[in-house]
C-alpha cells in the first residue's frame, strides 16, 4: 500500500503540525459550509423568503442525519489514527473496510426511513404552511442523495485519521464550485426554488465522491472499492460503535435541540423569523469552523500521540490548539457584533423584517462563539483517548437541560422573543465548559479505551 496517504503527526513541532493539518481542514469545512450558504444566498435573492424558510427547515433535518454519521465516523478516525501511531497496519486496513460497509448499509436504511417519515416530521416541527411544500421538496431530494453525503464524510474521516487533510479539501473545493454553478442554473435561471438548491447540493456531493474514489483507486488507497471488499468485521464494528456511537448520538442530540429551537421560532414568528434563524444558522456554520477544525485536528494528532505513548505531547497539542481557536473565534464574534445587518442583507435585501429579527437573534446567540473553542478542543482530546461517552453525556445534558429550557424560558415565558431564544446556545455551552474542565482536572481521560 502507498504510504502517501499516511503522515506521522506524533513527531516534530506541535504548532507547525497543527497549523499545516488544521488549515486545509478549516478551508475544507469553510468550502463545505458554502454548500448551504450558497443555497440560502441564491434562494434568498432569486426565490424569496418562503423558499428560504423551506431550505432552512429541510436543511435542519438533513443536518441531523449528516451530523449523526459524522459522529460515527469519529470512531473510525480515532482507531485509524491510533493504529497508525502504533504501526498496526493490518488493523488500520480492516477498520477502513468495516467503516465503509457500515456507512453504506446505514445510508440505504436511513434513506428508506426518511422518505416515509419526512411529512409527519415536518408537521411535528410546525413548519409554516406557506413553506411546507418547499421544505418537503428540499428534504425529499437531499434524503434521496444522502448516500453521497455519507460516503464523502467517511472518506474524509479516513484520510484525516491517516494524517491527510489536504486531499479532502481539493475534492470539496471542486464540488463547491459545481454546487454554486448548479444553484445559479437551477434556482436563478430556471426558478426551481428550494428543490433546485437541493438538487445542486446532491449532484455536487456525488461529483466529490466520484472524484475522491477515482483518485484513491489510482494511488494505492488501502481499500479497493470492489464489492467483495465491503465486509463488516465484527470486532472492529463493535470498536467503531463503542467510540463513534456516543459521538453520533451526541451530534444527534445537539442537532435535535436546535431543531426544537426551529420549532419554537416557527410557532412564535412565522416565515420571517424562520428565514432569519436560517440565515443566522448559516453564518454560525462559518463562525464555529475554527473551533471545529482545531478540535478535529487535536483529535487526530492527540490520537497518534496516545497510540505512540506520548501523553504529555497530546495535552500540549490540545492547549495550543485551543489558544489558536479562541483567537479566531473572538475575531468572528467581534465582526458579527459590529455588522449584523450588513451580513443579513447579503441574503435578502428586500425584507426588513427578516433583517430586524436576524439582528436580534445574532445579538445574543453570537456569545456562543467565545465559549465553543474551550468545549470543542478539550472534547477533541477526550475523543482521542476514546472517551466519547463523556462527550455524549455532557452534550446531551447541556442541550436538553440547558439549551432547550433556556430558549423556551427566555423566548416565550419571559416574552423576550427571538432574542431570548438566542440566549439558549451560550447558556448551554457555558455549562459544557464547566463539565469539560472538571473532567480534564480529574485525569480520568488519560485511560485509553481504544484496544
Image: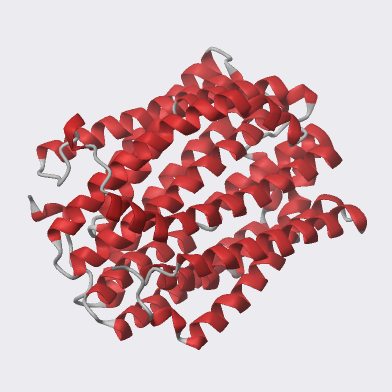
Residue found 47% across the figure and 41% down from its top: 34
Residue 326 picture location, percent across and down: 51, 71
Q: Is residue 210 above or below residue 385?
A: above
Residue 282 lies in what quarter of the image? Answer: top right
Is 153 drawn above or below residue 76 in the view shown? Answer: above
**Whole-percent x and y of residue 422?**
75, 56
Residue 30 in the image: above or below residue 65 = below
The reply to whether residue 230 is visible in this rendering is yes
Residue placed farthest to the left in the image? 1
Colouring:
secondary structure
Q: Horizontal and vertical percent for residue 38?
A: 52, 34
Residue 336 rendering spot, x and y as whole percentages: 64, 57
288 and 217: which one is in front? 217
Q: Is residue 425 left or right of residue 322?
A: right
Q: Residue at x 81, y 50 (%)?
A: 418
Q: Residue at x 44, y 27 (%)?
A: 145
Q: Can I make out residue 169 in this image?
A: no
The residue under the point 13% across, 59% down is: 89
Give the camera-side residue of 273 and 378.
Answer: 378
- Locate residue 207: give its quadrant: top left
Amino acid at each position: 500500500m502507498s504510504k502517501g496517504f499516511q503522515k506521522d503527526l506524533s513527531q516534530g513541532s506541535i504548532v507547525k503540525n497543527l497549523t499545516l493539518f488544521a488549515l486545509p481542514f478549516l478551508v475544507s469545512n469553510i468550502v463545505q459550509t458554502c454548500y448551504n450558504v450558497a443555497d440560502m444566498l441564491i434562494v434568498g435573492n432569486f426565490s424569496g423568503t418562503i423558499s428560504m424558510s423551506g431550505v432552512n427547515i429541510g436543511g435542519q433535518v438533513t443536518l441531523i442525519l449528516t451530523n449523526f454519521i459524522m459522529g460515527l465516523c469519529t470512531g473510525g478516525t480515532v482507531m485509524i489514527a491510533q493504529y497508525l501511531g502504533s504501526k498496526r497496519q493490518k488493523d488500520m486496513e480492516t477498520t477502513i473496510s468495516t467503516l465503509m460497509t457500515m456507512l453504506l448499509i446505514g445510508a440505504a436504511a436511513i434513506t428508506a426511513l426518511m422518505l416515509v417519515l419526512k411529512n409527519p416530521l415536518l408537521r411535528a416541527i410546525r413548519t409554516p404552511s406557506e413553506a411546507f411544500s418547499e421544505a418537503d421538496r428540499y428534504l425529499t431530494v437531499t434524503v434521496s442523495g444522502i448516500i453521497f453525503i455519507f460516503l464523502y464524510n467517511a472518506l474524509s474521516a479516513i484520510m484525516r485519521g491517516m494524517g491527510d487533510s489536504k486531499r479532502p479539501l481539493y475534492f470539496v473545493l471542486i464540488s463547491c464550485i459545481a454546487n454554486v454553478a448548479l444553484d445559479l442554473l437551477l434556482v436563478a435561471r430556471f426558478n426551481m426554488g428550494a428543490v433546485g438548491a437541493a438538487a445542486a447540493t446532491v449532484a455536487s456531493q456525488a461529483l466529490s465522491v466520484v472524484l475522491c474514489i477515482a483518485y484513491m483507486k489510482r494511488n494505492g488507497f488501502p481499500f479497493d472499492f470492489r464489492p467483495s471488499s465491503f465486509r463488516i468485521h465484527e470486532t472492529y464494528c463493535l470498536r467503531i460503535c463503542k467510540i463513534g456511537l456516543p459521538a453520533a448520538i451526541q451530534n444527534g442530540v445537539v442537532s435535535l435541540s436546535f431543531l426544537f429551537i426551529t420549532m419554537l421560532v416557527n410557532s412564535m414568528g412565522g416565515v420571517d423569523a424562520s428565514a432569519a434563524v436560517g440565515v443566522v444558522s448559516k453564518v454560525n456554520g462559518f463562525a464555529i469552523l475554527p473551533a471545529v477544525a482545531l478540535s478535529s485536528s487535536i483529535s487526530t494528532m492527540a490520537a497518534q500521540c496516545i497510540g505512540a505513548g506520548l501523553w504529555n505531547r497530546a495535552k500540549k497539542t490540545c492547549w495550543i490548539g485551543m489558544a489558536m481557536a479562541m483567537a479566531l473565534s473572538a475575531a468572528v464574534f467581534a465582526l458579527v457584533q459590529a455588522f449584523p445587518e450588513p451580513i443579513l442583507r447579503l441574503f435578502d435585501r428586500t425584507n426588513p423584517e427578516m433583517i430586524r429579527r436576524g439582528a436580534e437573534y445574532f445579538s445574543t446567540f453570537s456569545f456562543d462563539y467565545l465559549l465553543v473553542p474551550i468545549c470543542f478542543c478539550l472534547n477533541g482530546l477526550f475523543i482521542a483517548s476514546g472517551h466519547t461517552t463523556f462527550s455524549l453525556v455532557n452534550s446531551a445534558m447541556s442541550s436538553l437541560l440547558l439549551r432547550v429550557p433556556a430558549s423556551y424560558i427566555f423566548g416565550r415565558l419571559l416574552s423576550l422573543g427571538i432574542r431570548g431564544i438566542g440566549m439558549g446556545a451560550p447558556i448551554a455551552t457555558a455549562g459544557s465548559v464547566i463539565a469539560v474542565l472538571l473532567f480534564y482536572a480529574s485525569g480520568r481521560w488519560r485511560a485509553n479505551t481504544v484496544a
